Structure formats: structure tokens, C-alpha cells
Image: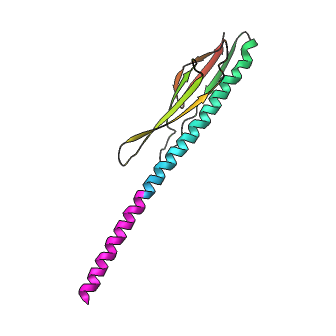
Amino acid sequence: MRGQISLDFLLAITVALIATGAILAVSGQISQTQAQASARQQLDGIGNSLGAVISYSALLNEADSASIEFDIPGLLIAGEAVPQPCTIIINTDNNTIDLSYDIIDTETGLSENVSVAKHFVNPVGMSILPTSAECGGSIQITKS
């Protein structure tokens, strides 16, 4: 009888450990998926805002000179104390804005890229500098 109780107890502990491991694995995956969704949503918002500013600068075509500065917000990622930088590339040849951010899994050390592409109306006579920036930086749209 005592042996059966010990065997049942060991079996119960084994099942509990396996269940705990499975819950932790699922929890880690949910956290990673949530970080990706959050980063993608923020990149999408930054791309929409930047595309709108670039497109609306076409209204300044009639002006002799004009200047617009767009401050790019940083990404707020869960678990990070400061806003994170992302990469932004403005391609005026095909009127796209490519935004990307590398999420690094702290447990495995592997990174996964989250990227978003946006389109804009390229304003004639306006220059956009720099054409490559990071979140937290700024973009200058000028006509001189």
C-alpha cells in the first residue's frame, strides 16, 4: 500500500511538472506573438503618419520655400525601459516607406524581423532628407 502511494505521488509530480512546462512554453509564445503584433501596429501607425505628412506637403508646391520636420516616435516594446529604434527607408522611386524592427527573443537570442510597407504621394519639387532614418529621429521635407 505504501509503495502504491509513493508511485502515485511520483506520477502526480511528474504530470504537474510536464503541465507547468507546457504552460510556460505557451505563455512565452503568446508573449512573443503579442510583441510582434504591437511592433507591427506601431510601425503601421508611424508609416501612416509619415506617408500623410509627405503626401500633404504637396500642398506647399505653390510656395517659394517651405520646410516640414517630422519627428519619428520610438517603438514602445513591452519589457524595454526606453523606446526602441526601428529602421525607416523612404524610396521616392516607387513611393514607398519601408519600416522594420528586429524583435530579439531574450531566451533563445534569435531575432525575428517585423516589417511594414506604406505608399505615399510623392510631392513634386520637394526633397525628403534623409531617405533612411530610425524611429526616434526626424525627417525633413523641404522646398527651396
The quadrant where residue 136 appears: top right
In which quadrant will I find the C terminus? top right
x and y percent of residue 68 in the render? 66, 21
Q: Relative to 130, does residue 34 appear above or below in the rendering?
A: below
x and y percent of residue 85 in the render? 49, 34
Q: Relative to 54, does residue 107 appear above or below in the rendering?
A: below
Give the residues drawn in magenta, as a range: 1-25
16 lies left or right of 68: left
Is residue 70 or residue 88 the one in the foreground?
A: 88
Q: Residue furthest bottom?
A: 1
Say if residue 85 shows up in the picture: no
**Residue at the image position 57 percent from the left and 27 percent from the top:** 97
Does the magenta portion include 2? yes
x and y percent of residue 1 in the render? 26, 90
x and y percent of residue 31 in the render? 47, 52
Is residue 37 or residue 69 the one in the foreground?
A: 37
Magenta span: chief secondary structure? helix
Q: Residue furthest left?
A: 3
Q: Relative to 108, does residue 51 appear above or below in the rendering?
A: above
